[in-house]
Image (cartoon, rainbow, N blue to C red):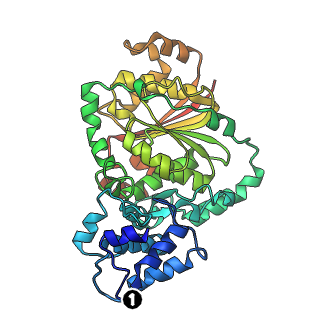
Amino acid sequence: DPTYLVEMGCPRSEHGVDWFAFLEEACRVCPPKDVCEMQPASDQLVSRMQQVFAEDTSYQCLSGLLSALIVSAQFFLLETKMPPELEQLFHENRSLSPFPFHTLQYSLYANMVPARLMTCDKSLWDDMANKYVPRVHPEHSGRCGMVYDDRTLVYKCRSRRPFIEIPRRNDILHSIQCPTLDDISLDPAMAEKLQKYGTRASTPSESCQSSKGMWREPMSDVHKCVLISVAHLLDFRPGQLVLDWGSGCGHKLTWAKALFDVDGVGLDVEGGAVAWARQHSAGVFCHADGRKLDWLPNGSFDHVISYASLYHMSQTDQCHTGIQLLRKLRIGGRAWFGWNQAFSMNAWEWQRCFKNASSFTELPQSDVQEMDHMAVDFQGIEDGFLFSPSPEVAGKHYLYQFPAFSVILTRLA
């Protein structure tokens, strides 16, 4: 509505920029708070955006200027250097109405990359329209032992697809119904331990829409390295179904879908991260208490992954959850639990959980009985030896340092 634009303090034109025409084009090709149509449909919008930055000048129409920066970030995948006062505005959660944009879209486009730009299944172009992952390249970081770039991984996946005889698990994926929030109950100590993740998720520009994710520092290059390494370790195959316990922002499942063509289900106790994942990550995401997994079908997943999540719980809850996750695997399915901490539950205790569950005296008897009817192959290995290119690199990055270790399981029966 151009009338509302005037009420917002925007002149019809300034410095050669026709804000009314810019608004009209934006409303034509950009759904509210969503990605704009690709070129050539948006050629006129891009042309008008370029007019805004043709000269180094100031503008009275602040919402128009911020909208132009968002359009620039989307179409040119560039982060623009700007004054601190403008940068601060993009960290706020506000609409730029009447323009169909929102301030948080800037960090999404500037910090992230559209997942559909490089996907194994080219038919997913439309389905992946608003899905994003951090803009990182672990193959160039010197911190990853497996150095495939995205293009190589996608070409490998496409090469394998014609020979993979795995039926899609869409029936399982579409049948999953997330539990209600009434099923989430955290004791005060656990709630306090997880509070920092809720705080981070409340500012997407500093968490899910950045290379930090749910961590305090930018480490998404390592997280992508971990996902690619685990995908090869477990042998992700197109059409398979993966469960991510503690999925956070959903970045790992989006990489898994784009690069390996596996479908994913993620669950996390942090509602803010789940809300972001549902909008911008590939997969089905549930806000849930990970200790209560009856709502997930048993024997349905080809793989289960979990990174830096299980160790937050007591040993009894870790063992209880691990047995439930094993139960979700198909026979022959494989699980990986990474960044476990030896001070919380070491590898020998994890092995005892699966090989001698009755020794966990506080474990529900039903879990002990379940393990009597399941067989599992168990492996434990330090993360520094699993993901790092060398011991020297492992010693420099705390995600690789002892006592971090991985548990690898194969369900045999």
Q: Secondary structure at mark 1?
A: loop
At label 1, the amino acid type is: Gly
- Mark 1 neighbour class, 10 Å CA radius: few under 14, some 14 to 19, many 20 or more: few
Q: Quadrant of residue 181?
A: top left
Query: Relative to 280, does residue 303 appear above or below in the rendering?
Result: above
Q: Position of residue 47 (x, y in %)?
A: 50, 83
Q: Nearer the viewer, residue 117 or 52?
A: 52
Residue 222 visible, this orientation: yes
Q: Quadrant of the C terminus?
A: top right
Q: Position of residue 321 (x, y in %)?
A: 45, 26
Image side of residue 216 versus residue 306, left or right: left
Q: Nearer the viewer, residue 380 or 410?
A: 410
Image side of residue 66 versus residue 372, left or right: left
Q: Residue at x 40, y 84 (%)?
A: 17
Q: Residue at x 63, y 32 (%)?
A: 175
Tell which residue pokes out farthest to the front in this image.
3
Image side of residue 208 versus residue 303, left or right: left
Q: Quadrant of the N terminus?
A: bottom left
Query: Relative to 55, does residue 312 appear above or below in the rendering?
Result: above
Q: Residue at x 39, y 33 (%)?
A: 310
Q: Quadrant of residue 148?
A: bottom right
Q: Which residue is mark 1?
A: 16
Q: Position of residue 385 (x, y in %)?
A: 43, 48
Residue 390 visible, this orientation: no
Q: Position of residue 364 (x, y in %)?
A: 43, 13
